[in-house]
């Protein structure tokens, strides 16, 4: 079964309960991966992060370092891919 | 630590240790000579192509910061609860454990209650990775004018045009350089140490420089021509030149505008692009005389100009709309506003467009580029104004008229750091606008979370000056809490923000103030606990910020054992994060801002504490590979190289850049809807416009209230981008220069008012007043008084530095009226009347 490396940052980490993990993945897409990741509230990461088929505005997902748009959850994954999910911190100050 | 033996540059023995200057953000490469554990000399690193072995005066004076006898070298707590200017805090030294315990207790209390009650004044650009600490604490607040004072409108517009953070003319190929309100290449702004050499080289090969400035600045004094101007009217001067190009000479780069910008896109009567049913922006297809989607028409078949009737609607190209706006921006009208004679406006426009060589090409490293060796450069003085967005747009559009954006000889974007331009495809074949490069755009919210109303500036910068209004009149803005604790991190809001009296009022309300800094200032003397940081000669980081012609990091490393009982700021903030229970979030934030999320190999474990060396080792390896960790940098000092032509010139390829800023108009319209839905009816939207034009600013209107003169502040290489006004080596130099000895006033004006050099005068603005000795000079516009920042400090601890106390920011107003409604940029000019004291 293909292996996917998953990292979770901030609130996403608190939801899945781990920071980094390599998992056996039987699905095909990023959306499948989010559905396969259970969260501490008894739901899945998909249920927490996705609204009407789109990634919520306060979260970001990177696949192999490339950021997905909210509509790109059907991006296909392959063995060895790295997926990072993270909550966006709104107030990193500027100057 | 890598060691090179002392060279012939000095007769002294010892070691030369490579490092990075930290006297300003730009991080020139340095070599520090250390003899018997004492740093004795700093030189520029000749192997670093950024500064080419050169240092500015601040860099040369770095040892006087390290060994400043008034530095704070041990944690302190105040014993006198009374606070204010001139009040002795009753400092007593304490151990770190006690200091941490007090700070964690006070911050923990407010975090449990409402973390937004923490106000944060953050500075220290080189440690920009630490700036997110308040965010993980839970505070959105920004209590400083740092960044906004100069770049509030500048950075967002650069980001919207080409994904850059700053901009500079092409030192290598430019032949005709107009400079507005900036010291680039002479005395300030981007990487001044190396830039002065690049400017000098360009002058040697014949480049002409025209400087437009209210004051005969170092740049103006060395230029081929100095054009005095009324502050805040540079836009009028440039609009007048644009009128000449478009309506009188009819010379502009039609091919560039048509093929590389959205100037040919059709605009409807509502000011938005004319789109088809699929939402695609339309252009006028000259082959069929009809509107077509932009991507269905070859670039050369698009109409650049014209007004068209379609189904009863009047459509104009974006270029035509600006052309129509420019009709009444004649040199004569713009001359009345700016005082630059119409004949000068016409002559400079003619010289500029001639030097631009529209249509020329150049081959560089086997690739052919457009060649436009004329460009207009600008910075704070020309655009830190209440209509700063319009100022910045004007200068970009004027450059676009000759097709010089991001091409050899022209006006080039400068990226924020080693990651280069922020480029991704946006709508309609355009580059995606990136107005915010330091943090994501916060969504609209009412009531707002942040005291500086960041949620209400969707294309803006952190408008710290607004704290003076929002915190003293919170009900006007719906703020439903009051801050109680202030964190000062290398920041001095009592010095760097407008309306000092109001900032004092706000600081008086704080139940607890903690300062992380290296010395006492106007603001840190109000602290309850002072946590002493290390200087750049005692600490570690990798730096790459706003490099105009290079890319890559330079290592800052300790060259001597840290003095006293100090700690690195990273260690301090990490310790506090752990004590406050958010070490995991802090590490996660560092994972994001250090870019570790792009390669999880280097990600920090959320629950582990990392030393500062471990952190930067990971950073180095994540960017440069495992064979270039911290040890490699300690041996080599830097990995800085010149940017390639591909990285410099039109790095966005075929993506178009905005000429018509429809995005700005759209964002404004959306904000208006959100505001109305929230019941806010008195917010201004006047600067959410797609194209620039002339309108008076509140500063000009203040002239009608009896404030006859304009007051400006200025900085030179001794004191730019830094807190060096308190350093004896540098003040000794500036005190010998008449320009830094008093309030500059033009000779003719002084004679008219009966003022002589040395006489005490008072400047009174709508916001406040300052006093100082008049310094009568020729080199300042007759309607202007100038205040060097070298005389602005009101509190210094070094007995050899004199307090002059003409604190310019007391004259400025921080309210919304003097703030750009779209970017949050502040107004850096004040109207004043002059009173003679003796
Ligand atoms: S320009 Fe900045 S980094 Fe360079 S020497 Fe001067 S103070 Fe140091």
Image: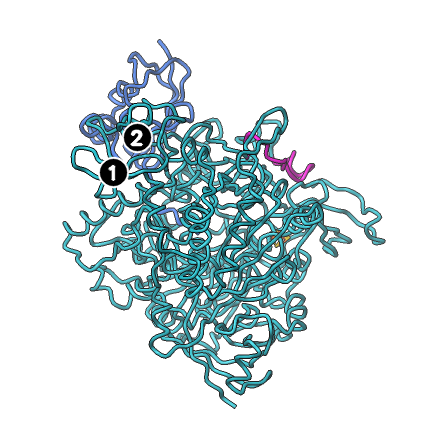
What residue span does the magenta drawing correspond to?
A: B630-648
Mark 2–mark 1 CB contact (< 8 Å): yes
Camera-nearest residue between B582 and B304:
B304
Classify 10 Å Cα crowding around label 1: few (below 14), some (14-19), many (20 and above).
many
How many numbered discs? 2
Q: Which chain is blue?
A: A
Q: Which residue is mark 1?
A: B315
**Res B744 seen here:** yes
Q: The disc numbered 2 marks a residue on which chain?
A: B
> In what element is the residue under mark 1?
strand
Classify 10 Å Cα crowding around label 2: few (below 14), some (14-19), many (20 and above).
many
In the image, residue B23 lies at what x, y percent?
60, 55
Residue ranking furthest to the front: B248
Q: Which residue is mark 2?
A: B284
> In what element is the residue under mark 2?
strand
Camera-nearest residue between B661 and B564:
B661
Camera-nearest residue between B556 and B218:
B218
Residue B191 has which mark?
none
Q: The disc numbered 1 marks a residue on which chain?
A: B
**Res B574 seen here:** no
Q: Which chain is cyan?
A: B
Q: Residue at x 67, y 66 (%)?
A: B729
In the image, residue A68 lies at what x, y percent?
34, 27
């Amino acid at each position: 079964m293909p292996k996917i490396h998953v990292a979770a940052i901030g609130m996403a980490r608190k939801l899945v309960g781990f920071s980094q993990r390599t998992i056996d993945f039987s699905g095909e897409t990023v959306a499948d991966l989010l559905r396969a990741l259970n969260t501490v509230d008894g739901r899945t990461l998909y249920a927490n992060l996705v609204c009407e088929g789109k990634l919520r505005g306060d979260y970001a997902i990177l696949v192999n370092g490339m950021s997905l748009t909210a509509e790109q959850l059907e991006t296909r994954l392959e063995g060895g891919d790295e997926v990072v999910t993270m909550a966006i911190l709104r107030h990193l100050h500027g100057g | 630590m890598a060691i090179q033996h002392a060279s012939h540059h000095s007769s002294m023995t010892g070691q030369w240790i490579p490092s990075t200057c930290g006297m300003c953000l730009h991080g020139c490469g340095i070599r520090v000579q250390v003899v018997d554990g004492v740093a004795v000399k700093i030189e520029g690193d000749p192997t670093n192509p950024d500064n080419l072995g050169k240092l500015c005066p601040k860099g040369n004076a770095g040892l006087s910061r390290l060994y400043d006898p008034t530095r704070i070298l041990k944690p302190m707590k105040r014993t006198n609860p009374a606070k204010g200017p001139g009040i002795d805090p009753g400092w007593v030294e304490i151990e770190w454990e006690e200091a941490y315990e007090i700070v964690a207790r006070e911050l923990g209390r407010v975090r449990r209650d409402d973390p937004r009650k923490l106000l944060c004044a953050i500075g220290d650009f080189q440690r920009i990775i630490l700036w997110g600490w308040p965010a993980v604490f839970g505070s959105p607040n920004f209590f400083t004018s740092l960044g906004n004072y100069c770049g509030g409108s500048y950075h967002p517009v650069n980001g919207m045009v080409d994904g850059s953070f700053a901009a500079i003319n092409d030192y290598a190929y430019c032949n005709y350089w107009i400079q507005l309100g900036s010291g680039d290449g002479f005395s300030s702004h981007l990487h001044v140490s190396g830039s002065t050499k690049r400017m000098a080289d360009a002058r040697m090969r014949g480049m002409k420089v025209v400087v437009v400035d209210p004051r005969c600045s170092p740049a103006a004094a060395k230029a081929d021509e100095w054009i005095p101007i009324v502050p805040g009217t540079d836009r009028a001067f440039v609009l007048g030149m644009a009128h000449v190009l478009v309506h009188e000479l009819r010379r502009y780069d039609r091919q560039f505008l048509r093929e590389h910008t959205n100037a040919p896109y059709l605009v409807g009567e509502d000011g938005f692009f004319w789109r088809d049913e699929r939402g695609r922006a339309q252009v006028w297809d000259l082959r069929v005389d009809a509107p077509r989607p932009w991507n269905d028409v070859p670039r050369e078949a698009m109409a650049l100009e014209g007004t068209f009737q379609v189904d009863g609607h009047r459509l104009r190209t974006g270029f035509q709309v600006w052309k129509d706006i420019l009709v009444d921006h004649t040199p004569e009208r713009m001359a009345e506003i700016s005082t630059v004679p119409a004949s000068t406006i016409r002559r400079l426009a003619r010289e500029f467009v001639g030097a631009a060589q529209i249509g020329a090409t150049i081959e560089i490293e086997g690739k052919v580029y457009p060649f436009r060796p004329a460009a207009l450069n600008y910075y704070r003085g020309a655009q830190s104004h209440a209509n700063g967005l319009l100022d910045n747009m004007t200068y970009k559009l004027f450059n676009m008229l000759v097709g010089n954006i991001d091409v050899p000889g022209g006006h080039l974007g400068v990226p924020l750091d080693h990651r280069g331009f922020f480029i991704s495809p946006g709508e309609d074949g355009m580059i995606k606008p990136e107005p915010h490069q330091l943090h994501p755009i916060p969504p609209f919210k009412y009531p707002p979370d942040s005291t500086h109303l960041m949620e209400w500036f969707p294309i803006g910068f952190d408008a710290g000056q607004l704290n003076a209004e929002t915190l003293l009149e919170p009900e006007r803005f719906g703020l439903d809490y009051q801050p109680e604790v202030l964190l000062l991190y290398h920041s001095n809001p009592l010095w760097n923000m407008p309306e000092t009296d109001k900032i004092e009022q706000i600081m008086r309300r704080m139940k607890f103030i903690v300062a992380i800094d290296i010395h006492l200032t106007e603001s840190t003397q109000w602290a309850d606990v002072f946590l002493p940081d290390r200087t750049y000669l005692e600490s570690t980081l990798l730096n790459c910020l706003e490099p105009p012609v290079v890319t890559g990091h330079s290592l800052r490393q300790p060259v001597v054992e840290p003095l006293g009982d100090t700690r690195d700021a990273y260690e301090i903030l990490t310790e506090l994060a752990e004590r406050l229970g958010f070490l995991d979030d802090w590490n996660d934030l560092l994972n994001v801002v250090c870019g570790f999320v792009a390669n999880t190999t280097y990600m920090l474990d959320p629950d582990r504490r990392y030393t500062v060396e471990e952190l930067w080792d990971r950073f180095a390896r994540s960017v440069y590979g495992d064979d270039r960790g911290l040890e490699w940098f300690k041996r080599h000092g830097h990995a800085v190289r010149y940017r390639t032509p591909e990285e410099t010139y039109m790095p966005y390829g075929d993506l178009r850049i905005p000429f018509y800023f429809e995005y700005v108009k759209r964002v404004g319209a959306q904000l208006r809807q959100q505001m109305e839905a929230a019941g806010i009816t008195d917010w201004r939207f006047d600067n959410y416009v797609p194209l620039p034009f002339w309108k008076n600013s509140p500063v000009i209107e203040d002239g009608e209230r009896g404030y006859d003169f304009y007051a400006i502040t200025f900085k030179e290489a001794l004191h730019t981008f830094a807190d060096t006004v308190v350093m004896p080596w540098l003040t000794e130099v500036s005190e010998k220069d008449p320009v830094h000895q008093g309030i500059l006033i033009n000779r003719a004006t002084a004679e008219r008012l009966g003022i002589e050099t040395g006489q005490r005068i008072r400047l009174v603005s709508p916001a406040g007043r300052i006093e100082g000795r008049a310094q009568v000079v020729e080199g300042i516009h007759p309607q202007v008084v100038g205040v060097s920042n070298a005389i602005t400090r009101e509190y210094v601890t070094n007995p050899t530095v004199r307090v002059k106390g003409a604190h310019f920011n007391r004259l400025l107003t921080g309210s919304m009226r003097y703030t750009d409604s779209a970017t949050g940029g502040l107004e850096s000019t004040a109207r004043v009347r002059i009173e003679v004291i003796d």
